[in-house]
Image (spheres, grey):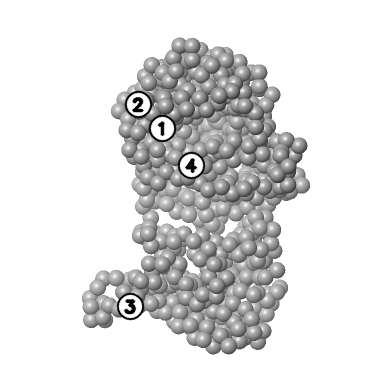
């Protein structure tokens, strides 16, 4: 039975991804900071899909534990999905380093730390797949969320470099740019319905893309073009915009 | 986030701050630090019972916790829909003990409305099948209740419209089935007399309900089609179906993409629809074997059928009258026929006996009708309420959007006891909906 490791398994997007893969008969390893809280999800996956789901304590910002965490998994996962992240509060993060550091470490440093470990292992085995959930916010810094955006930009660049490095060993790396997603992370925001995906849509798109070894996935197709336009706006004009 | 919310009838609408949770701890903290809260499932109750200033969306609370395939017990979080449950249990040979006419409701909603099905006369309402459940009460405690433990909370929560707290976990029993099919019998009844006689004649059937054409007068007054059914056994199926008796083929769904202009629904179109529906059964009696879905959930095949009533929305009027008060049924149907405000859907069902605190069912006749919202409708329904009261009946809170206070307090004999229990568990009056304010249920 192929196995998927989900890092940051408590998020709505991760739950949908877990269900999608479980429905396709993958065993699931759920990892998050408070693993005990994942028990209902573990039971749900086992009852609904008749697969084996396990739960594991994982703290993205506790770097020294990452190697032991990965080595200690009951089986080595065939696919690792890096789904953790923290949106944070931009205004607070401008003034309060603690908030800024949490955003950076949750979205970038922590991801680099654990995926370095996973990449070593996959490279040695010459197989495996890494899926990183990044964000369109990382494609150009905007005043409304550039701390989160810059961490995601770092993560996106990391994933593309990793893809480049691991290609020769047959390990595939996929970057996912979901755009707006209707989750608890965004429930306080007003999002444009046509550009907003449900977590299930993200999960379906990710699953389909893994079957085709896609490199970069935009979940809702308009995002690809929206970001293309946003990236093309000359800086002189861009800096005057309120985005 | 502020959102415009309405339930299935699209009447009324409210601006509500919606919050969703997946962790019990966060949910409890939210409950104790807020007021004017009401838990909301999939929004399939018709009226205003799950509309409040702050709504707790339970749809992410959707984990199935355990399934005892040997003994037929299921334990789920409250936000799981019946639709999801059927997908899991039917292939394993189990069915819901009680199901309403849509499978798109949540388990929490089924409890809060204490839903009934076509088998009420045999199996009672949903509450009778609950082994235990958890409710987060007004002080943020999770209380496990059942027919033996915290019985006051248990009975006030079944049919209690979410006013005792947030239902988070429910364990209930399932019904063993051999196939995913129903052996169905459809009987044409010339009038109300005849359909009531047929209900009695076929009361040994597990499932029964009748569809009434309520625009008929004279001899055909109350003409209807009685539909009865049993879970089919393997022997009832054809050889093709027998190959996989618990599996149903997937089928495409139709949807009403937008609100239809309300002029489309008028006496003429309803008459034409009813004429076609009644007329399609040429024979007096039809026997066949059908998949369980069209039998239990005929309207679910048309997603968003509620949009057919236009932007103003509609109300569903469902009442129950004691068995000996058939005259009340005649009186109400006569008023509707005189007024000419019939609905596409008029469903008649005979309930069995049920003792409960605040749940809707009681032994007698229940009729459900749709009325598009229009000028004069509420006055007309107030008149119907008077007849319901006069004959000792009551209205279903899950479908209600407009009943006046005194109608509720006069027609529910345990209203005061219910309000007292609500007061005990809903400390700080945290749980409140448009309906509870309208009916003074949390006074």
Q: Secondary structure at mark 3?
A: helix
Alpha carbon distance from label 2 to label 3: 56 Å
Give coordinates of residue A19: x percent, y percent. Answer: 59, 61
Give coordinates of residue A151: x percent, y percent. Answer: 43, 78
Q: Secondary structure at mark 1?
A: strand
Tell me which chain the residue with mark 4 is part of: B
Alpha carbon distance from label 2 to label 1: 9 Å
Q: Are marks 4 and 1 in contact (CB under 8 Å)?
A: no
Q: Are marks 3 and 1 in contact (CB under 8 Å)?
A: no
Q: In terms of sequence position, does the residue under pointer 2 or pointer 4 come before the other? A: 4
Q: Give the label on residue B302, or none.
A: 4
Tell me which chain the residue with mark 2 is part of: B
A214 and B141: which one is in front?
A214
Determine which residue is flagged by label 1: B315
Residues marked 4 and 1, same chain? yes
Determine which residue is flagged by label 2: B377
Identify whether B19 is placed above or below B198.
below
């Amino acid at each position: 039975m192929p196995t998927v490791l989900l890092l940051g398994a408590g998020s709505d997007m991760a739950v949908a991804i877990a269900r999608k893969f479980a429905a396709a008969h993958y065993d699931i390893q759920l990892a998050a900071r408070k693993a005990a809280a994942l028990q209902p999800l573990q039971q749900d996956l086992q009852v609904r899909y008749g697969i084996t789901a396990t739960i594991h304590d994982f703290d993205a910002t506790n770097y020294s534990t990452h190697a032991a965490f990965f080595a200690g998994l009951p089986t080595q996962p065939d696919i690792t999905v890096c789904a953790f992240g923290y949106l944070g509060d931009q205004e607070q993060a401008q003034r309060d380093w603690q908030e800024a550091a949490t955003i950076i470490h949750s979205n970038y440093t922590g991801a680099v730390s654990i995926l370095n470990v996973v990449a070593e292992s996959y490279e040695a085995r010459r197989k495996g797949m890494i899926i990183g959930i990044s964000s369109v916010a990382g494609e150009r810094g905007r005043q409304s969320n550039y701390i989160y955006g810059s961490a995601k930009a770092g993560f996106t660049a990391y994933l593309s470099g990793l893809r480049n490095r691991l290609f020769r060993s047959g390990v595939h790396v996929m970057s996912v740019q979901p755009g707006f997603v209707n989750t608890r992370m965004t429930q306080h925001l007003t999002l444009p319905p046509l550009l907003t995906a449900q977590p299930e849509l993200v999960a379906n798109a990710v699953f389909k893309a893994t079957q085709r070894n896609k490199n970069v996935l935009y979940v809702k197709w308009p995002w690809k073009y929206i970001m293309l336009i946003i990236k093309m706006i000359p800086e002189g004009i861009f800096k005057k915009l309120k985005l | 986030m502020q959102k415009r919310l309405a339930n299935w009838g699209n009447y009324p609408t409210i601006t509500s701050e919606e919050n969703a949770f997946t962790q019990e701890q966060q949910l409890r903290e939210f409950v104790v630090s807020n007021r004017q809260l009401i838990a909301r499932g999939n929004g399939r109750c018709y009226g205003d019972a799950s509309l409040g200033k702050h709504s707790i969306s339970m749809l992410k609370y959707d984990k199935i916790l355990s399934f005892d395939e040997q003994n037929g017990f299921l334990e789920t979080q409250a936000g799981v829909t019946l639709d999801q449950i059927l997908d899991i249990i039917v292939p394993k040979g189990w069915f819901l003990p009680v199901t309403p006419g849509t499978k798109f409701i949540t388990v929490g909603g089924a409890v809060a409305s204490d839903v009934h099905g076509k088998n009420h006369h045999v199996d009672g309402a949903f509450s009778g099948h609950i082994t235990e459940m958890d409710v987060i009460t007004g002080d943020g405690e999770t209380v496990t209740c059942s027919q033996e433990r915290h019985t006051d909370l248990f009975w006030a929560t079944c049919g209690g419209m979410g006013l005792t707290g947030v239902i988070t976990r429910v364990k209930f029993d399932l019904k063993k089935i051999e196939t995913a099919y129903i052996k169905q019998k459809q009987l044409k009844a010339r009038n109300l007399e005849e359909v009531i006689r047929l209900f009695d004649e076929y009361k040994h059937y597990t499932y029964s309900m009748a569809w009434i054409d309520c625009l008929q007068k004279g001899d055909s007054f109350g003409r209807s089609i009685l539909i009865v059914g049993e879970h089919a056994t393997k022997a009832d199926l054809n050889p093709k179906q027998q190959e996989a008796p618990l599996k149903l083929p997937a089928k495409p769904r139709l949807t009403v993409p937008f609100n239809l202009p309300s002029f489309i629904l008028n006496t003429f179109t309803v008459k034409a629809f009813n004429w076609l529906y009644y007329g399609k059964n040429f024979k007096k009696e039809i026997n066949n074997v059908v998949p369980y879905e069209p039998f239990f959930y005929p309207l679910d095949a048309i997603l968003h059928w509620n949009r057919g009533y236009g932007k103003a929305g509609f109300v569903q009027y469902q009442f129950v009258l004691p068995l000996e008060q058939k005259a009340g049924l005649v009186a109400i149907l006569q008023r509707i026929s005189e007024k000419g405000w019939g609905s596409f859907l008029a469903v008649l069902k005979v309930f069995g006996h049920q003792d409960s605190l605040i749940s809707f069912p009681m032994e007698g006749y229940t009729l459900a009708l749709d009325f598009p919202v229009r000028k004069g409708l509420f006055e007309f329904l107030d008149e119907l309420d008077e007849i319901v009261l006069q004959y000792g009946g009551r209205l279903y809170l899950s479908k209600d959007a407009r009943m006046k206070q005194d109608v509720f307090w006069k027609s529910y004999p345990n209203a005061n006891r219910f309000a007292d229990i609500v007061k005990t568990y809903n400390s700080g009056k945290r749980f409140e909906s448009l309906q509870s304010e309208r009916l003074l249920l949390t006074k």
